[in-house]
Amino acid sequence: MLNIESRSNPAFEAACPSGAAGPGHPEPERSVCRDVMSSGNGCQPQTLTKPALGETEAAELVDRVFGLKVSWIGPLPSYDDQNFHVRVSRDGGADEYVLKITNSEDSREPDLIEAQTRAMMFLSAEGFPSATPRLTKDGTIMSLESASGCGNKKYMVRLLTYLPGTPVAKIATNAQIFYEIGKLAASLDKALTEKFHHPSTKSLHRAQFIWNLANVPLLDQYLYALGQNKYREVVEQVIEQFKGKVIPKLSNFRACINHGDLNDHNILIDSSSASAQHPEYRVSGILDFSDMSYGYYVFEVAIAIMYMMIESPDPLGVGGHVLAGFESVLPLSGEERAALFLLVSGRFAQSLVIAAHTALLYPENQEYLMVTARTGWKHLMKMFEVGQEAVERTWFETARTYVNPSAAAEEPPTVQ
């Protein structure tokens, strides 16, 4: 089995009581959430939505749908969709792809899958390191296919270019890469919002999508999963403050299309030119557009800060570097900056509450689900222990040193 990071793992829509299931997410604590929710009323687990093709059948699918002869194929880990790393021989070399077979539930939303795929194609054309689809023999970007032995289930199939690189989660991070990721977050959303025009984008209005930061209040229905303890008390604070201080301000934030999931597994890094003493990184791949939705620019920087905190030995100091990179492209307004602490906290709450909810439904996966959650709880609790004012002061003064280099002579404050 290949030791390659998953390109797609599940998330879910807020489908209790009324949402429709949404697509994937690679973060460990979300890894089985897709099966948690079902379309329609109630919260019955979905079953048998994930494809289960063997390697031979997948290779035959590549031949039949895309007209390519597979010379090597191996599975890529995922929970909701099924992915294969595919190598196709050609004169003088080989091409590599990811065969992506979308679960049967999400395959019912072709407009959403098309919007995600068209966005990837657009970004690649704009110079972003995004995968692009290989067209089918019929000249389409995807094909709805039946799999033998799977009843009447149908799966949307795509063949995407394989992106090389190492996930941020696997490298020794530094301020430079955090800055670059902040800059990427702003540049990507700006390009999508200002230049990406396709009829399928209407599907990105996902009002009940649980991972959209505007929907932090929807976490109320899952709080039971935390029991009664200090963690629940902090999450309740986050939700209540979010309702009072963020939701009323949303109309004042600048709207955009969010990637929505620039986490430590969805950003690939090329460090081939880096030295051990002074590593210089560049982003070589952007993965997993399954959480795309209409939101706000400040959402993207908050999401990036939260996930980069997981990857730093100085988690409370990360925000300033990410913010500086973001604001080199899109300076935040005063109201957007004022919401940043609660937005980062809100993303932690989304991740941690849904992990706990999922662990109750799937106790056999509890240990796996809680590995990342333990780090997340530590960071969220520390943020509230230190307090919004001190955390923001560190973030904003660190960001200021990038704009005013003379300020770098003064050590930015650290939060203890």
Image (tube, rainbow, N blue to C red):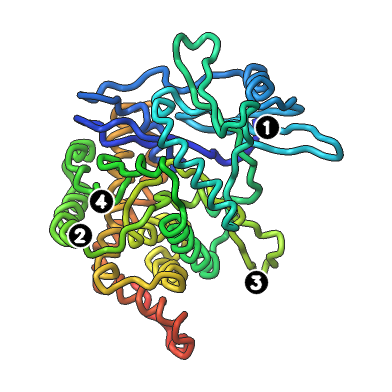
Q: Could you say where residue 377 lies in the image, as x and y percent from the top left?
A: 32, 51
Residue 368 seen by the camera: no
Q: Amino acid at mark 1?
A: Val
Q: Amino acid at mark 4?
A: Ala
Mark 3 to mark 2: distance in Å?
Answer: 40 Å
Q: In 3D space, how far apart are the residues under numbered discs 1 and 2 (Cα atoms)?
A: 45 Å
Q: Which residue is mark 2?
A: 246
Q: Secondary structure at mark 1?
A: strand
SS assignment at label 2: helix
103 or 383: which is nearer to us? 103
* Numbered circle sitting on residue 86: 1
Question: Which label lies toward us, 3 or 2?
Answer: 2
The answer to whether 88 is drawn above or below residue 323 in the figure is above
Q: Is residue 260 visible?
A: yes
Circle number at residue 214 = 4
Determine the CA span between mark 2 and mark 4. Answer: 8 Å
User: In percent of the image, x 31 and y 44: which residue is there?
Assistant: 205
- Going from N to C along the chain, the mark reached first, 4 or 3, is 4
Quadrant where the C terminus lies?
A: bottom left
Q: Is residue 17 above or below residue 92?
A: above
Asked if labels 4 and 1 touch by Cβ distance under 8 angstroms, the answer is no
Of the residues shown, which amino acid type is indicated by label 3? His
| Image vertical order of residue 77 relative to residue 322, above or below | above
- Secondary structure beneath disc 4? helix
Amino acid type, callout 2: Val
Residue 142 is drawn in which quadrant?
A: top right
Q: Residue 278 shows which numbered tag?
A: 3
